[in-house]
Image (cartoon, grey):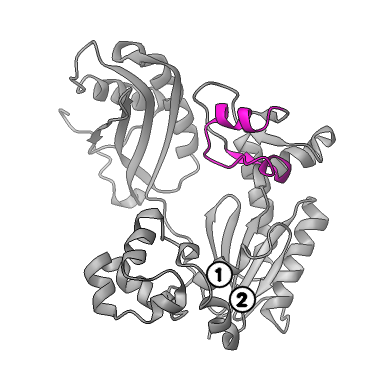
Amino acid sequence: MRKIIHIDMDAFYASVEQRDDPTLRGKPVIVAWQAKRSVVCAASYEARAFGVRSAMPAVRAERLCPQGIFVPPDFPRYRAVSKAVQEIFQRHTDLIEPLSLDEAYLDVTENKTRLPTATLVARTIRQQIREELHLTASAGVAPNKFLAKLASDWRKPDGLFVIQPEEIDAFLLPLSVGRLPGVGKVTEEKLANLGVKTVAELRSVERSTLEDHLGRYGMRLYEIARGVDENPVVTGRPTQSISVEDTLPEDVPLAETEPMIRRLAEKLWSASRKESRIPRTVVLKLKTKEFRVITRSYTRIVPPSSCDELTKIALRLRERVTLGPQQRYRLVGIGLSNFQEPEQIDWQPALFE
């Protein structure tokens, strides 16, 4: 039986800002650009008390919390802090699966520090984060990833919750199905139509019924309703794609997107330099004022070799968008995908592309 810890940093971006600027401590901090179309990247717990949440439009956050202090995000600084957190994890195990800058799974079935229990490992990690980085983290400890993630949210912020194997049913069965990962409003409504509102009721439904109504996810629900999750902690998960995008202050015609494309290409090229694998596909993403998403992609025999080359490809992809000069756009994005190992690339340039 595995011993899994899920660590989730508390209000990570906002907490870093409060740590680094003492004048922000105890105040409602909203990490976002204060612009008409910006969205909230993070909110301190003081701001959350007013209903401010991540991914909320910044204008709505400002209405909910007029006294909120808006701080523009500083992702290089957050990445540096995240790296320091990862280094603390590595003292205890090499089996680490980062999910984002602020959360990760750890398999401590066997731990480097020879602590006798996973609970003690989690407690030690939280203490080290507090003492060395002056930040707080919540942790969940359980026999699998699914339960550990549920547990880490149970006593946030700055909490620790443990689900022992013999306690799984007592913890799981009373829960609303809306607490299960992947159960959004649509799935919750489908389950309600089957008379299912709690995990206990979900467990009584036949596997075939769940599969008929919810497809492959019905099979997953059948398993997690019983506390079953065989997915291992996956280390070194290779990058599938990286992208950057920007919502524009005003809707603009296609001809006026070049400055944004050039700026985004610079950001994307800088981010791609941290990858050991090589991307061969460039993707341009546009969102119209009607919220229609358009993508154009190009896969090269030889990958882009410079930021200038990446920019030129993105601009050529823009020429393949043919909605007419009257169309307006609200978002521009650029991505890189189709990552391969350097030895898999044929570095001979094509005669004609």
Residue 105: which quarter of the image? bottom right
The image shows residue 193 at horizontal and vertical percentages of 31, 65
Residue 21 seen: yes
- Please state which of residues 193 and 74 is positioned toward the viewer in this rendering: 193
- Please state which of residues 75 and 50 is positioned toward the viewer in this rendering: 50
Mark 1, other Cα within 10 Å: few <14 / some 14–19 / many ≥20: many
- Please state which of residues 24 and 17 is positioned toward the viewer in this rendering: 24
Mark 2, other Cα within 10 Å: few <14 / some 14–19 / many ≥20: many
Q: Is residue 44 magenta?
A: yes
The image shows residue 233 at horizontal and vertical percentages of 49, 70
| Relative vertical location of residue 343 with respect to residue 120 in this rendering, above or below | above
* Element class at badge 1: loop
The image shows residue 63 at horizontal and vertical percentages of 61, 28
| Relative vertical location of residue 225 with respect to residue 312 in this rendering, above or below | below
Residue 108 numbered mark, or none: 2
Residue type, mark 1 in image: Leu
Extreme residue toward the bottom, this view: 166
